[in-house]
Image (cartoon, rainbow, N blue to C red):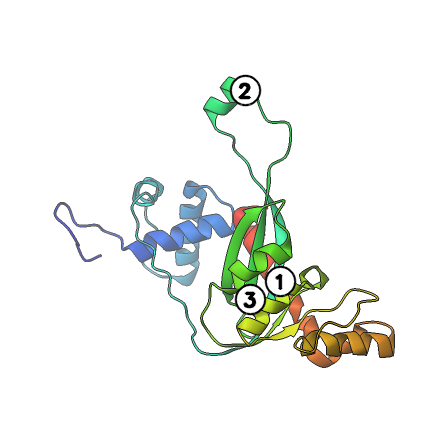
Amino acid sequence: ATPSSRGRPQRYSDLAITTVLVIKRVFRLTLRAAQGFIDSIFSLMNVPLRCPDYSCVSRRAKSVNVSFKTPTRGEIAHLVIDSTGLKVFGEGEWKVKKHGQERRRIWRKLHLAVDSKTHEIICADLSLNNVTDSEAFPGLIRQTHRKIRAASADGAYDTRLCHDELRRKKISALIPPRKGAGYWPGEYADRNRAVANQRMTGSNARWKWTTDYNRRSIAETAMYRVKQLFGG
């Protein structure tokens, strides 16, 4: 690696250290096991390289600079939105000693907005468990300034708050109305078309098929990826 400061030059780049840490996290390995795993890959490939020593990785992990770059720009054709609950672990030694261990489970809610074409997570937010999906929606969607043609979410988002935010950003709303839903004023044209379709066919099934609403399952796949990385 190219030295960036005074002192002994680093043997391994930040990218090398980051790669080891990613493999450790994805495969749920200890640092020592990750080192052996990577060395075995080099051996199988007949590549004359060695993985950074686990003690070196542990030391460098505290100061490594990880650069995150958004790979894409431009218009998003279809943004899919979903949320899931996350259990929070670890109460802190002082709290446990002072008040005892908390018997109730502590939960947070993770909200994601995903590009259905690239599977890239565009927006993410973490809220208290008592915050509803529709309440978290405006803050989530405001995180990006990219042009969005359409956004889909489940029936929990069928509220004026969500539809108003989509109208403000000129995004076509793909949110299935609840069973027996009534019409709203004329400015909510996207929702009223969905309600009309529901009344004609008796369900939202045909509307979902004609609008590509079922692409929303991609958000569920993104949730699974995140939970796997968190170890859940």
Question: Image quadrant of residue 106?
Answer: top right
Decide: few, some or many residues near mark 2? Use Cα within 10 Å; few <14, some 14-19, many ≥20.
few
Q: Of 16 and 144, which appears nearest the observer?
A: 144
The vertical placement of 103 against 62, above or below, is: above
Q: Which amino acid, mark 3?
A: Val
Q: How far separated are the C-alphas under marks 3 and 2?
A: 41 Å
The vertical placement of 201 against 14, above or below, is: below
Residue ranking furthest to the bottom: 210
Residue depicted at x 54% and y 72%:
168
Q: Assess whether mark 2 and mark 3 are in contact (beta carbons under 8 angstroms).
A: no
Q: How far separated are the C-alphas under marks 3 and 1?
A: 20 Å
Residue 48 can be seen in this image = yes
Residue 19's x, y, as percent?
A: 39, 55
Residue depicted at x 41% and y 71%:
71
The nearer-to-camera label among 3 and 2 is 2
Reading the image, the residue beneath label 2 is 99
The nearer-to-camera label among 3 and 1 is 1
Q: Of 215 and 19, which appears nearest the observer?
A: 215
Q: Which mark is residue 209?
A: none
> SS class of the residue under badge 1?
helix
The vertical placement of 102 against 117, above or below, is: above
For marks 3 and 2 on the same chain, the one whose residue lies earlier in the sequence: 2
Residue 224 can be seen in this image = no
Residue depicted at x 41% and y 67%:
70
Q: Which amino acid, mark 2?
A: His
Residue 133's x, y, as percent?
A: 63, 55
Reading the image, the residue beneath label 1 is 161
Q: How far separated are the C-alphas under marks 2 and 1?
A: 40 Å
Q: Answer with left or right where residue 138 lies relative to residue 134.
A: left
Reading the image, the residue beneath label 3 is 114
